[in-house]
Image (cartoon, rainbow, N blue to C red):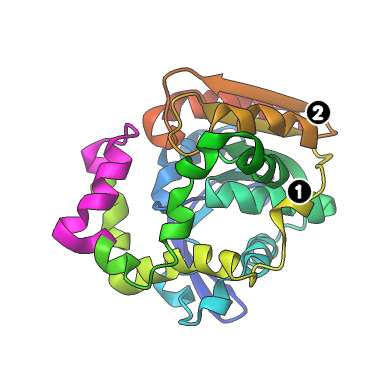
Amino acid sequence: MAEKIDVNGLIFDAEIAGERDNPLVLMLHGFPQTAYSWRHQLQPLAAAGYLAVAPNQRGYSQGAQPAETASYATRLLVEDALELARALGHERFHVVGHDWGGQLSWLLAAYHPERIRSLTVLSRPHPAAFAAAFRSDPQQADRSKHHKAFQNPETVTLLLENGAARLRRSMADQGVPAADIDAYLSVLQDPATLEAAVNWYRAAASGEGGLAAADVPAVAVPTLYIWGDADATVGETAARATADFVTGPYRFEVLAGVGHFVTDQAGARVTQLLLDFLSGR
């Protein structure tokens, strides 16, 4: 069910399934995606006794789309997640994140462990492991070259030209079906929305995020990390080093032949792993 959630005057569009009193599972999407990325998980989580909530995050919801780059500081994105949970009536919650949503999820668990029941991250390694990989893995910088490219003020024009050919190709090359690409672009083909999404990268690069990746501490909450070994943006070095930054119960699942967009390419497997991990927590 699509609903709107008011957080400090920002109106977030969200997909919600399950009873409000059930344990909250907050699912944070990445780039270039939307809440649609969690479509395979919402109803199974609700059926298993959870309140499953997948918001379109800051910039992706038109009612939560400030213009200034500084408004996309990473610390503000983290606060959004905390306040979304509170607006739903939950102080503690399970967090699940992919890509940029995974980055936020690591930060939530590292800096706000009292709020987090469990952590599940897809694709994105622990921030400190990711930062270290840029130094130790010669290929990681090339895998992540879009971070630098997105500082170009013409990025949105380039990404949307020729029917968003670049965005379509990047997702298709990683196994995202054409119909699902269309679903993501139904939101992101709007230039203002895509500009806001790209501003996540710009704010982080400018230091507006206020949370240096290399300094993020290890997390102690129960953690599930899922990585596809065909991921074009995250290499094995960073993925495997993530274990060094989890001090609590840790489970690492490698999906053979799966690329970066794991919920699109292996949605049923992700759901199975998530339900198994959450059971009893």
- Name the residue rendered at 48%, 74% in the picture: 64
Q: CA distance from mark 1 to mark 2?
A: 13 Å
The reply to whether the magenta stretch includes residue 62 is no
50 or 106, which is in the foreground? 106
Q: Which residue is mark 1?
A: 109
Circle 1 SS class = helix
In the drawing, does residue 131 fall left or right of residue 231? right
Measured as percent of width and height from the top left, residue 116 is found at 76, 48
Q: Is residue 29 visible?
A: yes
Q: Is residue 14 above or below residue 239?
A: below
Measured as percent of width and height from the top left, residue 60 is found at 43, 65
In the drawing, does residue 214 fall left or right of residue 42? right
- Name the residue rendered at 39%, 68% in the picture: 152
Q: Is residue 83 above or below residue 41?
A: below
- Name the residue rendered at 25%, 43% in the picture: 169
Dot 2 amino acid type: Pro
Mark 2 or mark 1, which is nearer the start of the sequence?
A: 1
- Around disc 2, counting alpha carbons within 10 Å, would you say few (fewer than 14), some (14 to 19), or many (20 or more)? few
The reply to whether the magenta stretch includes residue 165 is yes
Q: Tell me where the magenta segment starts and ends, as one range.
A: 159-180
Measured as percent of width and height from the top left, residue 63 is found at 44, 76
Q: Quadrant of residue 279?
A: top right
In the drawing, does residue 78 fall left or right of residue 139? right
Tag shown at residue 148 = none
Circle 2 SS class = loop
Tag shown at residue 249 = 2
10 or 78, which is in the foreground? 78
- Name the residue rendered at 38%, 35% in the picture: 264
- Around disc 1, counting alpha carbons within 10 Å, would you say few (fewer than 14), some (14 to 19), or many (20 or more)? many
In the drawing, does residue 20 fall left or right of residue 65? right
- Which residue is situated farthest in the top direction here? 256
Measured as percent of width and height from the top left, residue 7 is found at 60, 74
